[in-house]
């Protein structure tokens, strides 16, 4: 059984794969170690929160039963690590534009209600005004499941 949330993350990773190939980088889910420089640029896909609220009882056509439906608000981050030593702002913006083009507002083939970019951050050391060679793009994703059936989109 795989939660709809993981299906969403897997779909986003798949959509970013051509971007990584274009720039000779990699896409990965949440990582536990540093990204080696030879693997840059690196696009890490992770979620930082998933909040759900009841949406009432609805009829499920698949099971012919009434079920409690849940509305979810999922926050997905695409963290971009890059080289960009000459002009880091330009390097980050170039990669961010490629990510945004690969992940336009979408329903992810019916998996979600909507997915939209909500913010973009280029990480900069405030004391030195130097780029940290990373940034993130935050996507807000709305999707539905049934209570007790987290693997079924509703």
Image (cartoon, rainbow, N blue to C red):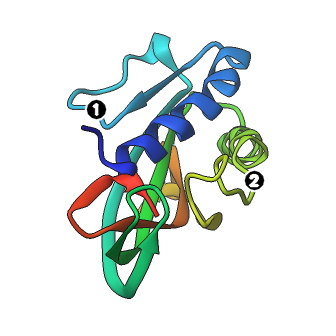
Q: In which quarter of the view is residue 98 placed? A: top right
Relative depth, front residue between 45 and 114: 114
Relative depth, front residue between 113 and 96: 113
Instruction: Give the percent coordinates (x, y) of residue 128.
Output: 46, 57
Q: Can residue 147 be seen at all in this image of the molecule?
A: yes
Q: Can residue 132 be seen at all in this image of the molecule?
A: no
Residue drawn at (69%, 19%) of the image: 23
Relative depth, front residue between 148 and 33: 148
| Above or below 131: residue 34 | above
Residue drawn at (50%, 47%) of the image: 78
Instruction: Give the percent coordinates (x, y) of residue 113.
Output: 60, 66
How busy is the neighbourhood of tag 2: few (under 14 within 10 Å), some, or many (20 plus)?
Answer: few
For the residue labelled by badge 1, is the local secondary structure a helix, a strand or a loop? Answer: loop
Name the side, left or right, on which 103 lies relative to 132.
right
The residue wearing badge 1 is 31
Could you tell me which quadrant the N terminus lies in? top left
Q: In which quarter of the view is residue 52 placed? A: bottom left
How busy is the neighbourhood of tag 1: few (under 14 within 10 Å), some, or many (20 plus)?
Answer: few
Instruction: Give the percent coordinates (x, y) of residue 87.
Output: 72, 39
Q: CA distance from mark 2 to mark 1?
A: 24 Å
Residue drawn at (55%, 61%) of the image: 139
| Above or below 55: residue 52 | above
Going from N to C along the chain, the mark reached first, 2 or 1, is 1
The residue wearing badge 2 is 104
Instruction: Give the percent coordinates (x, y) of residue 75.
Output: 43, 64
Residue drawn at (43%, 41%) of the image: 7
For the residue labelled by badge 2, is the local secondary structure a helix, a strand or a loop? Answer: loop
Query: Which label belongs to residue 42?
Result: none
Name the side, left or right, on which 41 lies relative to 38.
right
């Amino acid at each position: 059984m795989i939660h709809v949330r993981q299906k969403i993350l897997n779909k986003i990773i798949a959509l970013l794969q051509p971007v990584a190939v274009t720039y000779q980088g990699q896409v990965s889910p949440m990582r536990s170690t540093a990204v080696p420089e030879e693997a840059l640029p690196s696009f890490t896909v992770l979620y930082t929160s998933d909040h759900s609220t009841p949406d009432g009882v609805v009829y499920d056509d698949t099971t012919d039963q009434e079920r409690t439906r849940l509305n979810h608000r999922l926050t997905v981050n695409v963290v971009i690590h890059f080289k960009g030593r000459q002009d880091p702002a330009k390097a980050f913006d170039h990669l961010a534009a490629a990510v945004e083009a690969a992940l336009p507002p979408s329903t992810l083939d019916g998996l979600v209600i909507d997915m939209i970019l909500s913010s973009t951050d280029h990480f900069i050391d405030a004391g030195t005004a130097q780029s940290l060679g990373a940034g993130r793009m935050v996507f807000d994703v709305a999707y539905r499941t049934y209570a007790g059936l987290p693997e079924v989109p509703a």
